[in-house]
Image: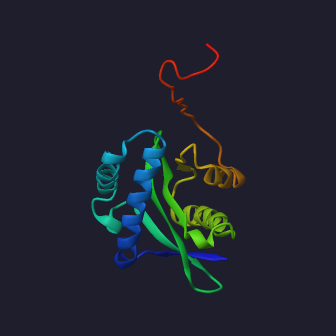
Amino acid sequence: MIQLIPMTEQEWDPIQRETIAEYAQEHVRGGRWSQDEAMDKARKELAGLLPEGIHTEGHAIYAIVDSASGKRVGHLWFQEKEKAGRPCIFLYDLRIAVPLRRRGFARAAMKTLEDVVREKHEARRIELHVFGHNVPARRLYESVGYEETHVMMAKELKPWGTHSGL
């Protein structure tokens, strides 16, 4: 159904800008960053992770291509790293173009990622982070066998005098 094709710099440039903007907004929504600081922090984090762009050693950035049409439908980015003395893949980003979502491309990309990892990498574990408020992504990952390994929780408190019942 899909193929993973190494991304070119020309393809990555606009996706990088989109990735930074979306990552910044996810952190604002999650309460970690303020709107004023989010873009700068997101740029710095991405630059720290990919100092050589798509050529950063240990990282792989792929276009997700629909095999039937040849159309690029999204992308994924992962890094091979070591965790607890064992090789591990960390999936940083999986994104399907908005008009093409809910057509099975993300699920197919996750399956193909597993095949690529088995074939080309020593890792036998794939990890990822998903924001708690991103329910569609959480459901996708759970449906393909991912399990929560730790959970952070937060509660926004209303100022004194604004809550009822006391």
Residue 132 location (% of width, % of height): 57, 43
Query: Number of callouts in the render?
Result: 0
Residue placed at 64% from the left, 16% from the top? 165
Foreground residue, 163 or 76?
A: 163
For this orientation, the residue located farthest to the right is 143
Residue 148 location (% of width, % of height): 62, 40
Residue 124 location (% of width, % of height): 57, 52
Give the answer, above or below, for where 86 lies relative to 68: above
Residue 32: quadrant of the picture: top left
Foreground residue, 61 or 40?
A: 40
In the picture, which quadrant includes the N terminus?
bottom right
Give the answer, above or below, for where 61 lies relative to 154: below
Residue placed at 69% from the left, 70% from the top? 103
Residue placed at 62% from the left, 73% from the top? 100
Residue 47 location (% of width, % of height): 29, 56
Relative placement, left or right, of 83 versus 116 is left
For this orientation, the residue located farthest to the top is 166
Residue placed at 57% from the left, 34% from the top? 151
In the picture, which quadrant includes the C terminus?
top right
Colour scheme of the rendered structure:
rainbow
Give the answer, above or below, for where 66 lies relative to 42: below
Relative placement, left or right, of 152 versus 34 is right
Foreground residue, 92 or 136?
A: 136
Residue 67: quadrant of the picture: bottom right
